Image (tube, helix red, strand yellow):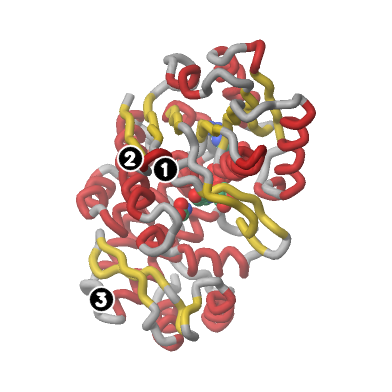
């Protein structure tokens, strides 16, 4: 087992990473404290892992709340149902919520923990690669609103994150690859050595070799922990984690969130960001091909689809919250392994980069 600490003074916490941590070991039982426990999960992950988790928790003070699967349930209504459950059982402030699932369950359960009695303890057991390397670390919690994703939420750091990499064995292929896109992001924005390692290990990543997954998750969590420790509330450098996300989000919006998973859209977005950086002379020539080549080998999409007009993407980007003084605030690359926040790209340059990423 490896442990990475997210250094946040009194809110510091460990992220334990290992094989089989949901089946054995005492990390979970010691993280939950002495109060009552509510395990929140969904109807896909529950049948797979809930029994093992419950075996490690005291039966007399543990309850379970199971939601239906899916992003459509990451709502104020589901959040309210979790609160209803806590109130119905007169749960006191020393309680702990345990989230067992992907980013949807983590964000929802975390927001319930952030808001019940103005904040109770919370332990994350992330079971998707995306949740293990990104969503479970850093304290962003929340739910969606009909007007937009993650519009309602709070920062609330967990007490501990326990990552069992063995859960990757049941994760559907596309979900796994979508998580890999976020892993590549860490290499691109701040870790050139990791980027080279990823390039050298595409085969074992695709085969989900246990030791490869373990290393990939550990290095990603270390990177995320450092970013969060430096800028917990996203006043500045944490925004670098959004590489490819503005373009990705525009593509997801224009395709009604139906065609691609978030990580897949981010993969295309990272290629566009690299192309824009290269066209603007920030990034060495040929780097975009290197980024696209790696993502392609990892089974991720890299081209802007022909049925999405560049002008529509630009328009959707402009509606995004990251506009500053009329110019879009984008994350660009100044090297493969170093990112910057930039607000000086002209709309024509953005359009040219989008068009330069067609198949
Ligand atoms: P998800 O939670 O919907 O999980 C994807 C699918 O995999 C679901 O059907 C789920 O039930 C299933 N699943 C989960 N673990 C499994 C396993 N081990 N085996 C089989 N199936 C499994 O999606 P996600 O990609 O994990 O998370 C996306 C969510 O995370 C979004 O709502 C996004 O906004 C949020 N997010 C939050 C942060 C943050 O910092 N809080 C960061 C990134 C993303
Ligand atoms: N997923 C972006 C962040 O945690 O800031």
Residue 303, how many percent across, how many down? Answer: 45, 67
Compare marks 2 and 3 and give the one earlier in the sequence.
Answer: 2
Q: Which residue is mark 2?
A: 216
Vertical side of 270 occupied by 111: above or below: above
Left or right position of 85 against 284: right
**On-image quarter of the N terminus:** top left
SS at mark 2 in the image: helix
Q: Nearer the viewer, mark 2 or mark 1?
A: 1
**Residue 207 image offset from top left, x and y in percent:** 38, 36
Residue 93 figure quarter: top right
User: Can residue 104 be spotted in the picture?
Assistant: no
Q: Tell me, for residue 282, which label it has, or none.
A: 3
Residue 133 location, quadrant: top left
Marks 2,1: beta carbons within 8 A: yes
Mark yes or no: residue 320 visible: yes
Residue 9: x %, y % from top left: 36, 41
Q: Quadrant of the C terminus?
A: bottom left
Task: Name the one closer to the observer, 312 or 96.
Answer: 96
On screen, residue 216 above or below 72: above
Tell me the residue at 69%/31% (across/down).
Answer: 43
Q: Residue at x 38, y 66 (%)?
A: 271
Name the image quarter holding residue 20: top left
Could you tell me which residue is drawn at 47 percent across and 84 percent down? Answer: 325
Binning the other alpha carbons within 10 Å of mark 2 as few (below 14), some (14 to 19) or many (20 upward) gives many
Q: Nearer the viewer, residue 129 or 292?
A: 129
In the rendered structure, which disc, 3 or 1, sits on the residue that comes first in sequence?
1
Q: In the displayed structure, would residue 303 be above or below residue 157?
A: below
In space, the residues marked 3 and 1 are separated at their CA atoms by 28 Å
In the picture of the structure, the residue carrying the numbered disc 1 is 133
- The residue at the point 35 percent across, 29 percent down is 210
């Amino acid at each position: 087992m490896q442990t990475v600490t997210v250094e946040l003074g009194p809110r510091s916490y460990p992220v334990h990473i290992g094989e089989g941590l949901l089946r054995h070991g005492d990390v979970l039982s010691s993280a939950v404290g002495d109060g009552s426990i509510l395990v929140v999960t969904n109807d896909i992950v529950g049948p797979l892992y809930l029994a093992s988790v419950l075996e490690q928790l005291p039966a007399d003070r543990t309850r379970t709340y199971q939601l239906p699967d899916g992003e459509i349930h990451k709502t104020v209504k589901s959040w309210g149902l979790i609160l209803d459950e806590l109130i119905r059982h007169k749960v006191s402030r020393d309680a702990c919520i345990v989230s067992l699932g992907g980013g949807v369950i983590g964000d929802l359960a975390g927001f319930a923990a952030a808001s019940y009695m103005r904040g109770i303890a919370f332990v994350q057991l992330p079971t998707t690669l995306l949740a293990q390397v990104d969503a479970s670390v850093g304290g962003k919690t929340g739910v969606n609103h009909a007007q937009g994703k993650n519009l309602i939420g709070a920062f609330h750091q967990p007490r501990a994150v326990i990552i069992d990499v063995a859960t990757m064995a049941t994760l559907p292929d596309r979900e796994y690859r979508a998580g890999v896109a976020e892993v590549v992001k860490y290499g691109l924005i701040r870790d050139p050595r990791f980027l080279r390692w990823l390039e050298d290990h595409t085969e074992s990543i695709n085969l989900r070799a246990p030791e490869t997954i373990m290393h990939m998750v550990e290095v990603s969590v270390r990177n995320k922990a450092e970013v969060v420790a430096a800028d917990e509330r996203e006043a500045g450098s944490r925004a670098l984690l959004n590489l490819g996300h503005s373009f990705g989000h525009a593509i997801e919006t224009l395709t009604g969130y139906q065609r691609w998973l978030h990580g897949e859209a981010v993969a295309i977005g990272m290629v566009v960001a690299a192309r824009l950086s290269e066209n603007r002379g920030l990034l060495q020539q040929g780097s975009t091909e290197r980024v696209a080549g790696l993502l392609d080998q990892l089974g991720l999409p890299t081209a802007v689809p022909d049925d999405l007009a560049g002008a529509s993407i630009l328009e959707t980007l402009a509606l995004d919250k990251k506009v500053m003084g009329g110019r879009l605030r984008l994350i660009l690359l100044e090297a493969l392994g170093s990112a910057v926040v930039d607000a000086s790209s002209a709309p024509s340059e953005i359009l040219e980069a989008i068009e330069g990423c067609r198949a």
